[in-house]
Amino acid sequence: MDNTLHFKLFGSGKLPDEARAALAADEVLALDEGIRVDERFSGSVPGLHSGGRTFRFSGALGITRRKVFGTLGSWTAFDAAWDGDGPGLVTLDEQGLKLEVDVARIDPAWKGELSLEFRRPFTPEELARFPKRTLACSLSREHLLQLAGARPKRRGQ
């Protein structure tokens, strides 16, 4: 797997030590650092209105018997149990991992779509080891705003 240039030069997308320890406590099925992550958002949430934009990050991805975990840079993008519930849909396939969120499922006043694509191809053998290929992921309002890159106005502005 090729690592991003930001990972090679600066370590961006390195799995945080706490996350590494938590993942190591379970059977690790896949683990990669410094992989390309494409973040796309189009819609309207507090602090952000976008007709569509894409950002690229270096991230890390860990898959264990109990959960799927992903980071953007050094902060947690999602942490989902295989039997979890929530508005995010995580899909694993030959291309990698994709998280898709209809933001109106988090707040009905919001509109749009957010997606994260972790560009880490999986072999058929790896996919066969995963408990399933799709799972639900919970996201708080604050976490979705952070993922989308919203910068709400401060009072008095």
Image (cartoon, helix red, strand yellow):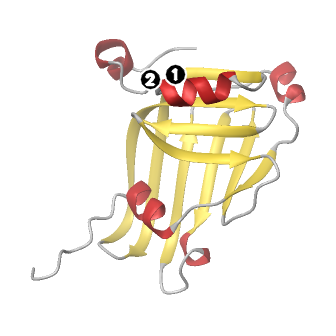
The residue to which callout 2 is attached is 14
Q: Nearer the viewer, residue 108 or 38?
A: 108
Local secondary structure at mark 1: strand
Q: Could you tell me the amino acid type at mark 1?
A: Glu
| Residue sitting at the far left | 157
**Residue pictured at 79% horizontal, 48% vertical:** 134
Q: Quadrant of the N terminus?
A: top right
| Residue sitting at the far bottom | 109
The residue to which callout 1 is attached is 33
Q: Circles 1 and 2: CB distance less than 8 Å? A: yes
Q: Is residue 40 left or right of residue 9?
A: right
**Residue pictured at 20% horizontal, 74% vertical:** 153
Residue 101 % position (x, y): 60, 62
Residue 60 % position (x, y): 52, 29
Q: CA distance from mark 1 to mark 2?
A: 5 Å
Residue 104 % position (x, y): 56, 78
Residue 111 versus residue 6 in the image, above or below: below
